[in-house]
Image (spheres, rainbow, N blue to C red):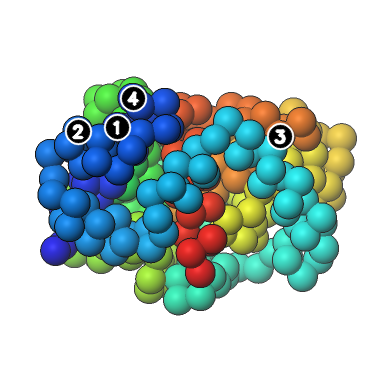
Amino acid sequence: MDHTHNFQVIRRAIAAIYRFDYSCRFQDLVDDIRLSPESFKRAFSFLVGISLKKYQQSFALDHAKSLLQKNLNKLQTAQEFGSSESSRQDDFFVSWEAMAPRAQASKGDGITIYEGWYQSPFGEVIAMGTDRGICGLGFASEMGQDVARSDLIKRWTAAHLKPANTQLDNWMATAFSQCGKIDLHLIGTPFQIKVWEALLAIPNGHVTTYSLIADKIGNPKAVRTVATAIGQNPIGFLIPCHRVLRKSGEMGGYHWGLPLKREILAYEGALTDAQ
């Protein structure tokens, strides 16, 4: 069973969980997505490795607050919230480099960016990348394909766009399997990149706050500016801006839609609990 099929199954299951208000029985769920129990279990276990009941618990309304209470003290320690040019989680590696400032100023003039659509556990995603790494990843589930694509393109209006190449396909095969190595090519201002670097240091299954990110980059009074930079993150999921909450434990904003933010946090929480 390939990743594409599994992603489609998980996406349909997530949608059904929402429709049933997070309390559906297993049989109701498999009936709704028109799969046999055996097929669903295989697909679900392949990607998540945790029971449906535990996964549903991760969608509870107080899940974000419990994550914050559980993880906040850990994230305040330097070793667990350090920064580097490479982030490693088990067998998943994310390395990055920043594009020259002139590329940001010129809206990508002289740069070739490859683009393509891919399946994920959260619906269709559009990925964009240079020869050096992924520079954009957007979700269509809330805003649709055209808006998601336009959202990324408007950042680099002078770039030369081409259909996805093999390298982008390979990076995206790694992105949601969480196994392998991905390169990111960050296009942003120095301040934005500093904030995005801090986001890359947040461990999978953990969350932090906007104020802690501001502290981390050495500018504790710049909480609003940090929040703006987080909202401008062009590489959803891989640069984990979804792991940033308000101090109260409330979700805060999310560029690709709050329902998607909840889905991703629940997904990561389930994966972490299963380890």
Cβ–Cβ under 8 Å for marks 1 and 2: yes
For this orientation, the residue located farthest to the bottom is 91
Eye-nearest disc, 3 or 4: 4
Residue at numbered disc 4: 19
Residue drawn at (43%, 32%) of the image: 22
Q: Answer yes or no: do the residues labelled 4 and 2 have beta carbons within 8 Å?
A: yes
Give, as a three-letter code, the residue at label 3: Gly
Circle 4: element type: helix
Disc 4 marks which amino acid?
Arg
Q: Position of residue 155 (x, y in %)?
A: 42, 34
Q: Which residue is mark 1?
A: 16
Q: Which mark is residue 249?
A: 3
Q: Residues within 10 Å of mark 4 (few under 14, many from 20)?
A: few
Q: Pointer 2: what residue?
A: 32
Residue 27 on image: x %, y %: 24, 41
Kindly state the secondary structure of the residue where label 2 is placed. Answer: helix
